[in-house]
Every structure is written in structure tokens, then in C-alpha cells.
Image (cartoon, helix red, strand yellow):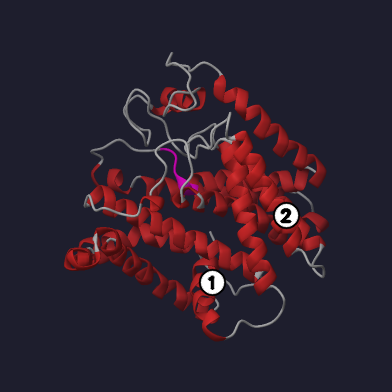
């Protein structure tokens, strides 16, 4: 643990909102699949192509991983560069994140060893994106990184159209019927180690999908460098324009290369990056002016900040608290209220209580000015 350094408030708030969103989405899925409750559809992931609120939060977090890198490593790049010590720091942080993610993805398997384990997962992808982007921050100039973003996103399209390794017909609008998914099946399909099972199964955080996810981190890195270069200038409007352009280009591209979270399609990267940058522009224009937040606005800002400054800790905690505190106890609020307010609204009550229960310990960390670093 260590005391926090000077931070960009808008970034911490938006990061916190995305972590809250990830917990909200996971808990809502627990209500839907576990209790077969009727929930608001936008809080569930799209079955394949398309975009819902639930599909935006994870890519938003990855983009902010990129935004944070030049702020965290800028001094090291200017003084020492990518020396052996810095390389070891990046490697071990990547390894620790990946290992924690693997353990969280396999809590049930570790308890019984009676079901298939899973190699990939959310923290594993965050780890790989961080590691790749951190190294590229040292090795490539900002201009070369922009070219790399374009190359990854453009070349990922024909890569997805290569005939599947296992002979399944290629159809990007059909779930799992593409080369990207077939690589997951060849790697981990035997034994059912992919998240999505079956002959057309795959892993939504699989190997090849990490490539455009890295591009998303690099987009965030470019945004972070822009904010650093223009500390004293009005940058919110520029960010808004960049965000709108990415959404429009991504949506247009989505007509031929559909917006698909599960393979992290290039159009998905642009649309979700654009939405995130638009949100960041609004928060940046509001919170980073140097004036303290006052009035009722302090409540949501403070709430989100707790999740934002200890994002990984909050994400890990939401996995562990599910069994520690008893999810079944919280779901009683759903059974007690569904006849009065409707199932979809009632399904939110245990979810909100769960988020509140996670907020309490991380708010304590915020008040103590402690940051748990992985």
C-alpha cells in the first residue's frame, strides 16, 4: 500500500464508474442466469453482434489503462528508458494481474477440481493489454503507435475472415463462426475450457481478440499523452470531437465488420473507445478545472472515486464477497419486492446492495489514502 500521487480526477471517476458498471453487469447476470429473474436487457451482454450498456464497460476500462500509462511511466521514459529494471517491473505486474485473473476465473475449479478450468478472463486481458502497451510506450514514438493502431484494426478484419481452423463455415453475423473463435476452440476446446461451450464455442477474452484490445489501450495512451501535453489548454471539446468521430467511423464500419464484443471487432473498438472518450471529455471539463466539487455532486463523485483509485482491488473483492457475504441473503430483497415494483426493478435491489457492500471497504481505503497496487 502507498499514498496516492497527484491524479487526474476525471480519469479516476470514470474508471470508478466502469468498475461499478462491471460489477453491476456481473451481478445482474447472476440474477438472470442464477434466479431466472427478468432484468433490464441493456444490463446483459449482446448475444453476439450489437451493443448494449453492458458491452461498453470493459473496453472503457481498457482504454483508461492506456490513458494511465504515460501518466505513470512518463518520468521513467524521460530518465531511464526501458532498462532491465523497468522491464522487470512491467513483466511482474503483468504476471501478477494475469495470475490473479486466472485464480478468479477458476474459483469453482480450485474448490472442487470437478469442472473444466478456464485460461482466459477479464483480468488476464487487462494484464496483457497493460504489458504490451507499457512496453510499446517505451519502444515506439506516438506517431508510430498511431500507425500501429490503424494496422491492427485494419488487418484484424481480414484475419477474422480466414476460414476457420476446424472447418466451420465463416459468417461474422453468426455466433462463433469465424477464424478468431476457431483459434480458441483449437487451443482450449477439448475438455470444455472455453467460456462459451459447444462445437461453435470460443472465449470472449481469447487469444486473437487481445490484439484489437491492445489497440484500444494504445488509443487510450494517445489520449493520455494529449492530456499531458495540453495541461493548461481547454481539451474537453477536442476530446468530444475525437470521441464523436470514432463512434461514427466505428458505426459505419460495423455495417460490414459487425460490432461484436466477443471477438473484440475493430468496429467495436472504435465505437466503445468513442463513447468512453466522450464520457471522459465531459468529466474532464467538469472535474479537472482545479475547483473543488461541492453540493450534492460530491456524493456520486466520492462514491465513484473509491472504486476508481482502487479499481483492481474492488474488482477482485466483488468476486470474493459473492461467497463470503452470502449472495442468497441479498437476493431476498428481490423476492420480497418483485410483486410490488416488478421483476426488473426488484432485481436491481440485491445488485445495488452488493455494490454498496463492496464500496464500504474501498471507501475506507480512500479515506485512509491507501492504494492497493498489484
Q: List the residue tagged with mark 1.
A: 305
Residue 100 on image: x %, y %: 45, 51
Task: Tell us which disc is closer to us: 2 or 1.
Answer: 2
Q: Is residue 130 above or below residue 337?
A: above
In the structure shown, which secondary structural element does the residue marked by tag 1 occupy? Answer: helix
- Report the front residue among 78 and 20: 20
Q: Is residue 122 magenta?
A: yes
Q: List the residue tagged with mark 2.
A: 241
Residue 265 on image: x %, y %: 56, 35
Of the two numbered discs 2 and 1 on the same chain, state the one appearing first in sequence: 2
Prevalent SS, magenta region: loop
Residue 241 on image: x %, y %: 72, 54
Q: Residues within 10 Å of mark 2 (few under 14, many from 20)?
A: some
Magenta region: 119-123
Residue 91 shows in the view: no
Q: Is residue 370 magenta?
A: no
In the structure shown, which secondary structural element does the residue marked by tag 2 occupy? Answer: helix
Amino acid at each position: 500500500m502507498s499514498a496516492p500521487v497527484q491524479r487526474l480526477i476525471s480519469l479516476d471517476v470514470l474508471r470508478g464508474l466502469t468498475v461499478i458498471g462491471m460489477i453491476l453487469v456481473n451481478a445482474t447476470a447472476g440474477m438472470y442466469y442464477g434466479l431466472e429473474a427478468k432484468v433490464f436487457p441493456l444490463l446483459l451482454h449482446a448475444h453476439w453482434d450489437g451493443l448494449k450498456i453492458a458491452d461498453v464497460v470493459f473496453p472503457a476500462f481498457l482504454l483508461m489503462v492506456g490513458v494511465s500509462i504515460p501518466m505513470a511511466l512518463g518520468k521513467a521514459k524521460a530518465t531511464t528508458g526501458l532498462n532491465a529494471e523497468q522491464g522487470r517491473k512491467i513483466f511482474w505486474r503483468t504476471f501478477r494481474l494475469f495470475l490473479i485473473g486466472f485464480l478468479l476465473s477458476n474459483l469453482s475449479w480450485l474448490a472442487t477440481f470437478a469442472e473444466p478450468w478456464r485460461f482466459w478472463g477479464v483480468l488476464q486481458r487487462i494484464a496483457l493489454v497493460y504489458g504490451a502497451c507499457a512496453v510499446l510506450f517505451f519502444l515506439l514514438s506516438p506517431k508510430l503507435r498511431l500507425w500501429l493502431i490503424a494496422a491492427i484494426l485494419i488487418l484484424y478484419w481480414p484475419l477474422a475472415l480466414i476460414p476457420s481452423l476446424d472447418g466451420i463455415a465463416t459468417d461474422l453475423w453468426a455466433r462463433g463462426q469465424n477464424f478468431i473463435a476457431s483459434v480458441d476452440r483449437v487451443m482450449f476446446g477439448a475438455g470444455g475450457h472455453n467460456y462459451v461451450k459447444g462445437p461453435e464455442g470460443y472465449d470472449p477474452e481469447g487469444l486473437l481478440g487481445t490484439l484489437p484490445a491492445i489497440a484500444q489501450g494504445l488509443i487510450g495512451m494517445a489520449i493520455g499523452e494529449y492530456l499531458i501535453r495540453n495541461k493548461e489548454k481547454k481539451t474537453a471539446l477536442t476530446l468530444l470531437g475525437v470521441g464523436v468521430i470514432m463512434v461514427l467511423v466505428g458505426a459505419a464500419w460495423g455495417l460490414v465488420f459487425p460490432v461484436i464484443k466477443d471477438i473484440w471487432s475493430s468496429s467495436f473498438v472504435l465505437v466503445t473507445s468513442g463513447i468512453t472518450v466522450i464520457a471522459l471529455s465531459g468529466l474532464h471539463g467538469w472535474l479537472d478545472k482545479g475547483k473543488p466539487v461541492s453540493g450534492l455532486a460530491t456524493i456520486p463523485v466520492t462514491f465513484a472515486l473509491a472504486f476508481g483509485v482502487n479499481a483492481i482491488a474492488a474488482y477482485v473483492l466483488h468476486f470474493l464477497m459473492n461467497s463470503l457475504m452470502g449472495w442468497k441473503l441479498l437476493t431476498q430483497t428481490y423476492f420480497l419486492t418483485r410483486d410490488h415494483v416488478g421483476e426488473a426493478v426488484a432485481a436491481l435491489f440485491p445488485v445495488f446492495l452488493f455494490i454498496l457492500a463492496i464500496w464500504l471497504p474501498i471507501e475506507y481505503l480512500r479515506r485512509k489514502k491507501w492504494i492497493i497496487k498489484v
